Image: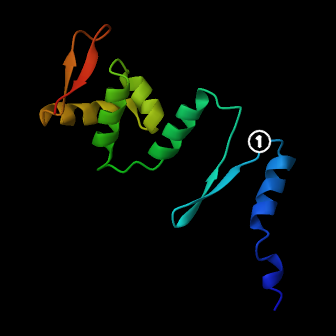
Amino acid sequence: MGLIEKYGSGIQRIVSYFEEAKLPSPEFRNISDGFMVTVFSDNVTKDVTKDVTKDVTKDVTKEERGSVIIRLLNEKPGITTDEMAEKLKLTRRTILREIENLKKHNKIRRIGGRKEGRWETIK
């Protein structure tokens, strides 16, 4: 059937792809009952966080918005509603509505004024 011909060639193909892309070779290790591959990159930038946040929040459902907003507030207490709207791909008005809902349910509070203030989550 020709299936066995490629058996066991996966690791070499992975290494070849990395070499072609001029990336550091991955590290392969046997661990316990499994196998671990570590991929290295020398071109990690600050934009990685933005990309991850964008991917994670891309399809945020209405029910998840509050918890995502709380996470953003914990990461950056001085974040603006415009910044939250941009990160979550929502309108500023939607963010304001979510914030009001979180305040109403005693999940967050504002400390200080509009320009110099910060957000605090309530546990």
Q: Residue furthest right?
A: 20
Mark 1 neighbour density, 10 Å: few (under 14) some (14–19) many (20 or more):
few
Give percent across and percent down for residue 70: 29, 34
- Is 107 on the left-hand or right-hand side of 91? left
Image quarter of the C terminus: top left
Q: Secondary structure at mark 1?
A: loop
Kindly indicate the quadrant of the structure image that contains residue 8.
Answer: bottom right
The coloring applied to the image is rainbow
Instruction: Check the image and report above or below for 32 versus 94.
Output: below
Callout 1 amino acid: Pro
Residue at (53% x, 33% y) in the render? 49
Residue at (81% x, 92% y) in the render? 1
Give percent across and percent down for residue 27: 69, 49
Give percent across and percent down for residue 13: 81, 61
* Residue where numbered disc 1 is placed: 24
Kindly indicate the quadrant of the structure image that contains residue 119.
Answer: top left
- Is 57 on the left-hand or right-hand side of 17? left
Residue at (45% x, 43% y) in the render? 57
Instruction: Check the image and report above or below for 101 versus 5.
Output: above
Residue at (79% x, 54% y) in the render? 15
